[in-house]
Image (cartoon, helix red, strand yellow):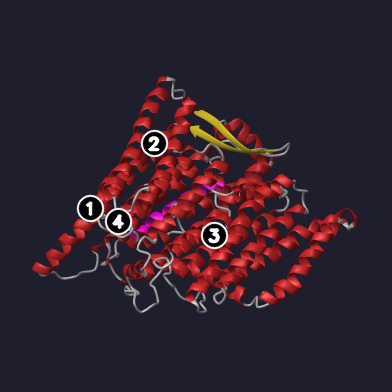
């Protein structure tokens, strides 16, 4: 078997495993468990075998451009794989941790209602993990990155009949998406720096990278800041640290594999993969070191006052990730990989034994007397008391994001009362037809008007998305606003560059399919319930209508441009047609995709997850 076949196997094995796991009967717990364990074991054996083969050939980094999904004279979308030392370390740790967690979960989740669902999601996470670690360019990286986000969202809300897991899953997904703005803008910026697809293999040689940085230093700083923003959100670096303890609402085993060992270290992976680019920008290095130091210090203080084991482990992990950031800023990449391995296994161990520790502590508390005391670290005077209170409030990081971003967007969206069904049909639709007419006759229009049309149409699309984000009364209106925003987005970019019929098919293929399915599901749900429902509550309809929940999730993923759909390629094609000097337009369209995705995912969670409001369903406490 040649090297190409091995690399393809690293992706095909988890893909086939995930697909086959979907058809396994839910009542066959032992079969599901052993099948999942065997599939990850086969991946691990294949990886070890290939690592020996790779080492025998001198440990030379290898690049594999496997599938060209779209190609034109100006742009090429390639699924590309890359294998080097970073890849080996992350894949080996991933395989070993996954085997431990799957073995543990077979016992820990025995007779749980979501046993099969858990292992389905773990195998999907394995596919996303392989895709991300093996990615050889930004396009492939984003595909795996998005799949990681969805699998995290599903596993945090594993106990989907409870309020807090569902609420926290939406919160974590929202912060993930905010960070994804950085990754989208980094991809766009890299295209304009290199004027072609950027492969990570090309970032190994500093000579070419230095040439691009020297020619466009300000733009290079913008790209590096975008990368740092994406990495910070994924690895819970300040100011994004508050999401990690909220993610611990899932089962202990998913907390171990996601937020203790693997997923939380992907921000570090992104920084490692692109280090040759940003390392020679001194301002970025100082900023990374400052963020890492602040994250480590604040997370250490917060971890000292946490009253749950999971939260203590979460903040302890952030402390170590902050130290890794400092190591990266100093250029100690090999030490970062060693640090990652140690932190991943330590946090996995701590989280997997946490149920036993809790049981032991409860028994000790029952049969012996103890006096609760403040952690000794804080017994040093007024200044220490201030830090103690700040630590208890987790430095108000959660409130910071709510006030700075989400609350402001909600309040702004609530003022957009213009977007009613009547106005959409009788005012917005004619306006769109006029804009479409202007597009076809753009050669006769003043150049100034043509140059401003992309921003004007983009702002209209962004207002629609903000309306969908804040909408609480009409689910179909919220869904329809995101759907219509795609049409305005496409027309906006068309004023920049005439898009081909094939590009249109890529973009609208997933949007139209998902939009039709979503609207049908919402209508069907309303007919079955025979009652008005809004988005102010959680309804828990998944237990009554699992088929509708499944189809609505698929429709949401299609409309938001998830990598399983052609819309994902279409979105990338659109961004490739945003010019270098159109920074505002790039930010507008990033916000459209990010907040549109949050609005859709939240509508799904509120309609189908959470406590069922009907009296004949048992309800967990709101604090559960």
* Eye-nearest disc, 2 or 3: 3
Residue that label 3 marks: 556
For label 4, the crowd category at 10 Å Cα-Cα, with few meaning under 14, some 14 to 19 and many 20 or more, is many
For label 1, the crowd category at 10 Å Cα-Cα, with few meaning under 14, some 14 to 19 and many 20 or more, is few
Residue at the extreme right of the image, as rendered: 444
For label 2, the crowd category at 10 Å Cα-Cα, with few meaning under 14, some 14 to 19 and many 20 or more, is some
- State the residue at coordinates (28%, 53%): 351
- State the residue at coordinates (64%, 51%): 509
**Residue 288 pos. (x, y %):** 49, 49
Looking at the rendering, in which quadrant would you find the C terminus?
A: bottom left
Under circle 1, the secondary element is helix
Asked whether the beta carbons under mark 1 and mark 3 sit within 8 Å of each other, the answer is: no
Under circle 3, the secondary element is helix
Of callouts 1 and 4, the N-terminal one: 4
**Residue 120 pos. (x, y %):** 38, 50
Quarter holding residue 318: bottom left
Residue that label 2 marks: 89
Of callouts 4 and 2, the N-terminal one: 2
**Residue 563 pos. (x, y %):** 55, 48
User: Would you say the magenta stretch is mainly helix, strand or loop?
Assistant: helix
Q: Which residues are magenta?
A: 283-301
* Eye-nearest disc, 4 or 2: 4
- Residue 288 magenta-highlighted: yes
Under circle 4, the secondary element is helix
Of callouts 2 and 3, the N-terminal one: 2
Residue that label 1 marks: 353
Q: CA distance from mark 2 to mark 3?
A: 34 Å
Residue that label 4 marks: 252
Q: CA distance from mark 1 to mark 3?
A: 37 Å
- Residue 354 magenta-highlighted: no
Q: CA distance from mark 1 to mark 4?
A: 9 Å
């Amino acid at each position: 078997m040649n090297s190409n076949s091995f690399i393809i196997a690293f992706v095909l094995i988890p893909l086939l495993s995930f697909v086959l796991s979907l058809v396994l009967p839910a009542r066959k717990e032992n079969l599901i468990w052993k099948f999942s364990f065997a599939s990850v074991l086969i991946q691990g054996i294949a990886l070890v075998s290939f690592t020996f083969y790779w080492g025998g050939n001198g440990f030379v980094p290898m690049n594999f451009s496997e599938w060209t999904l779209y190609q034109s004279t100006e742009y090429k979308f390639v699924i590309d794989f890359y294998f080097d030392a970073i890849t080996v370390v992350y894949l080996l740790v991933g395989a070993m941790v996954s085997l431990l967690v799957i073995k543990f979960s077979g016992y820990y989740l025995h007779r749980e209602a979501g046993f099969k669902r858990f292992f389905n999601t773990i195998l999907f996470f394995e596919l996303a993990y392989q895709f991300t670690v093996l990615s050889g360019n930004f396009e492939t990286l984003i595909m795996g990155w998005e799949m990681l986000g969805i699998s995290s969202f599903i596993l945090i809300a594993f106990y989907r009949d409870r309020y807090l897991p569902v609420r926290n899953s939406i919160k974590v997904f929202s912060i993930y998406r905010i960070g994804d703005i950085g990754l989208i803008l980094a991809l766009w910026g890299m295209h304009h720096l290199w004027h072609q697809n950027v492969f990570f293999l090309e970032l190994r040689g500093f000579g070419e990278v230095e040439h691009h940085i020297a020619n466009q230093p300000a733009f290079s700083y913008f790209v590096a800041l975008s990368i740092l923003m994406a990495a910070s959100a994924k690895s819970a670096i300040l100011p994004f640290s508050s999401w990690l303890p909220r993610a611990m609402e899932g089962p202990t085993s998913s907390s171990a594999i996601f937020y203790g060992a693997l997923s939380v270290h992907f921000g570090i992976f992104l920084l490692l993969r692109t280090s040759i680019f940003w390392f020679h920008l001194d301002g970025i290095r100082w900023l990374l070191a400052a963020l890492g130091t602040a994250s480590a210090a604040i997370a250490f203080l917060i971890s000292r006052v946490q009253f749950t084991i999971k939260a203590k482990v979460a903040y302890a992990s952030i402390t170590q990730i902050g130290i890794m950031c400092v190591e990266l800023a100093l250029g100690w990449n090999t030490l970062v990989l060693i640090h990652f391995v140690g932190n991943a296994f330590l946090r996995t161990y701590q989280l997997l034994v946490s149920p036993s520790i809790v049981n032991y502590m409860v028994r000790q508390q029952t049969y012996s007397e103890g006096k609760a005391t403040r952690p000794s670290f804080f017994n040093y005077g007024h200044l220490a008391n201030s830090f103690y209170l700040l630590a208890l409030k987790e430095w108000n990081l959660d409130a910071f994001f709510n006030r700075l971003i989400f609350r402001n967007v909600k309040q702004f969206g609530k003022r957009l009362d213009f977007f009613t069904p009547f106005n959409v049909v009788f005012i917005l639709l004619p306006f769109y037809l006029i804009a479409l007419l202007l597009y076809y006759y753009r050669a006769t229009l003043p150049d100034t008007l043509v140059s401003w049309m992309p921003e004007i149409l983009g702002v209209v699309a962004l207002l629609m998305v903000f309306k969908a984000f804040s909408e609480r009364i009409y689910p179909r209106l919220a869904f329809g606003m995101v759907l219509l925003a795609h049409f305005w987005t496409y027309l906006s970019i068309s004023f920049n560059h005439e898009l081909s019929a094939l590009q249109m098919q890529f973009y609208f293929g997933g949007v139209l399919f998902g939009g039709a399915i979503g609207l049908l599901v919402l209508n069907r749900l309303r007919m079955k319930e025979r009652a008005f429902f809004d988005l102010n509550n959680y309804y828990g309809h998944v237990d009554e209508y699992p088929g509708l929940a499944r189809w609505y999730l698929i429709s949401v993923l299609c409309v938001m441009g998830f990598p399983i759909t052609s819309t994902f390629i279409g979105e990338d094609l659109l961004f490739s047609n945003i010019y270098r000097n159109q920074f505002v337009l790039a930010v507008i369209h990033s916000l459209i995709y990010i907040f549109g995705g949050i609005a859709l995912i939240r509508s799904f969670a509120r309609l189908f997850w959470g406590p069922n409001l009907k009296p004949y369903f048992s309800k967990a406490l709101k604090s559960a």
